[in-house]
Amino acid sequence: MAEGGSAPAVRRSWPVADWLRTYRRDRFGPDAVGALTAWALIVPECVAYAQIAGVPPQNAFYGAPVALLAYVLFGTSRFLVVGATSAAAVLSAATVADVSGDPRLAVALSAALAMLAGAVLVVAGLAKLGFLANFLSEPALLGFLFGMALTIIVRQCGKILGVSGGEGDFFERAWTLLRHAGDWHGPTIAVGAAALAALLLLERWLPKLPASLVVLAAGIAVSAAVDLDDHGVDIVGKIPRAVPVPAWPDISAADWLALLAGAFGLALVVFAESYSIAGRFAREHGDEVDADREMAAMGAANIAAGLFKGFAVSGSASRSAAAEASGGSSPMVSAVAAVLVLVTGAFLTPVFTDLPEPVLGAIVVVAVRGFLRVAEMRRYWRRDKPNFAVAATALLGVLVFDLLPGLLIAVGLSLVLFIAHASRPRTAVLGRIPGTDRFGDVADQPGATTVPGLLLVRPDGPLYFGNVARLKLAVHDLVAAADPAPERVVLNLVSDFRLGIPVLDTLDELRLELARKHCALHLAHVHPEVRPALDDSAVGRALGPAGVHDSVGDAVRAYQRDSTAGDGTGPSGRADG
């Protein structure tokens, strides 16, 4: 029995056991092709995103293989490929810059931040908090990512124009670039513009080619052939060989604490980005992904990256999509890609010595342009102006206050949206649907008839302390508008599987206030989970068994019986005042 019970438990703890146990050898060929495709994107983006994160390129090669393998061990998506992304890199850089401006500490601080964000995600996953990603609303995330992309682009423009990008927020950096227009470097602009054009043309006309790798290779070849460095074009320079070796970040306890707030924000964005990508592939292929396990898996990947002197990682939409389009369909893609990246870092880093900086800038600009979802912003503007305002506010928050404050604004707006929506539940008046014994919303059911003297009310959403007062006011308005005045109000609690003390107390207030209007309050469709709390409350004791009904139909029949009997006392007839 012990052995029989332990195997499923192991598979639940180690998702890798499930796919390894059923992996077919004939899948290795397509998975290897998918891995090569992912590698072709990982290599140039490692170099580019390391610069965004403010760390040397070799540190990307330290963290990438171990992050990939950590996700293979713990992740639940067959298609997600993790690694450095623009969102994770720029948030990492912003957090580290707030803690220290010393470039000598950037590597250790970036690694520590990745480990802290990973720890946050692991703890949250074990606590089954995966649902929290749902609170980052789509409009707020849209605006945040749009602003983040613009911020990244303006930072890369300095490399493409051959001048310093300056400091400060988006507008300050843009003004710095314009102020130094006279210093723009012609050969650098030519290289950057050629790289941008090549990337866009390859993506347009040869979408199956890894455009980033092709342009990166061409840039290195041209740079070495014509000595672009001698013409004033900045190049990456020598990159040390990168063999991952574990090392604990050498920073003070004060620095660890200073990174903590940013780690929470980074963890939220990493999980929201990764889970949305994994979920999209799961829907397309009929799979399932476990939000809590995904949270823990992304945490493990970030801890591994930080422990090996890397920086924060996330799920990559471009690499995942490219690998899937090439035939990859299992975590073996990430396992093989990890080996390829490891070999690249150990033996091939000298190849990148002549890589022009404007080519890197162009690769980053093209990589993040997908976040500039202008059509989606227009759709919100045309059809949903309140949510457009949320997206625009998050966007401006990033541009004016930088990324972390912008992220907090986006999260705050998401919570405000949720609270505002949850605090205004629609209140439906129910009537009998013609030809049936069922009751529906009179606004949605043509011909539905109400019962004279009886007001059937259904709050379309669960009640909690933030909306029950609004329900009480809505019931009073419906009673005042009813003609003839109702003798009894029945609340249909079909949406409620928990009634807290504030809700029960407010329902008792409603009962007493209706009683002063000679109207009784009854409840219908009270779920078994709710009964103990209701029976132990003042409103439950006042109503008694006669005032609580299993269904709306039972409540209607009880009212008709009481009316026929002429019983006007107690909770089942007219209120006793």
Image (cartoon, rainbow, N blue to C red):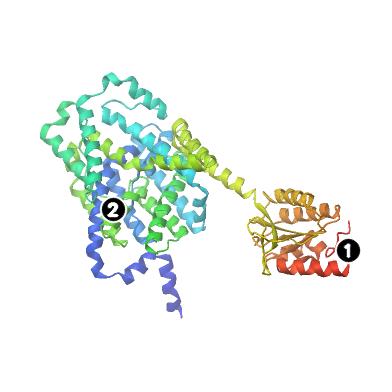
Asked whether, in this view, residue 12 is left or right of residue 221, the answer is right
Residue at 46% x, 41% y is 262
- How many angstroms separate mark 2 from mark 1 (CA)? 73 Å
Q: Label 1 sits on what residue type?
A: Gly
Residue behind mark 2 = 322
Disc 2 crowd, CA 10 A, few/some/many (<14, 14-19, 20+): many
Which percent across, then down, holds residue 101?
Answer: 39, 31
Asked whether, in this view, residue 97 is left or right of residue 56, the answer is right
Residue at 70% x, 48% y is 470
Residue at 39% x, 53% y is 277
Residue at 43% x, 78% y is 4
Which percent across, then down, holds residue 24?
Answer: 27, 70
Residue behind mark 1 = 568
Q: Which mark is nearer the camera, 2 or 1?
A: 1
Q: Quadrant of the C terminus?
A: bottom right
Q: Nearer the viewer, residue 407 or 106?
A: 407
Disc 1 crowd, CA 10 A, few/some/many (<14, 14-19, 20+): some
Which percent across, then down, holds residue 520?
Answer: 82, 59
- Name the N-terminal-most of marks 2 and 1: 2
The secondary structure type at the circle numbered 1 is loop
Q: Nearer the viewer, residue 203 or 183?
A: 203
Which percent across, then down, holds residue 234?
Answer: 22, 30
Can residue 509 be seen from the camera position used here? yes
The secondary structure type at the circle numbered 2 is helix
Asked whether, in this view, residue 176 is left or right of residue 266, the answer is left
In the picture, the disc for residue 382 is none
Q: Which quarter of the figure has residue 6?
A: bottom left
Q: Label 2 sits on what residue type?
A: Ala
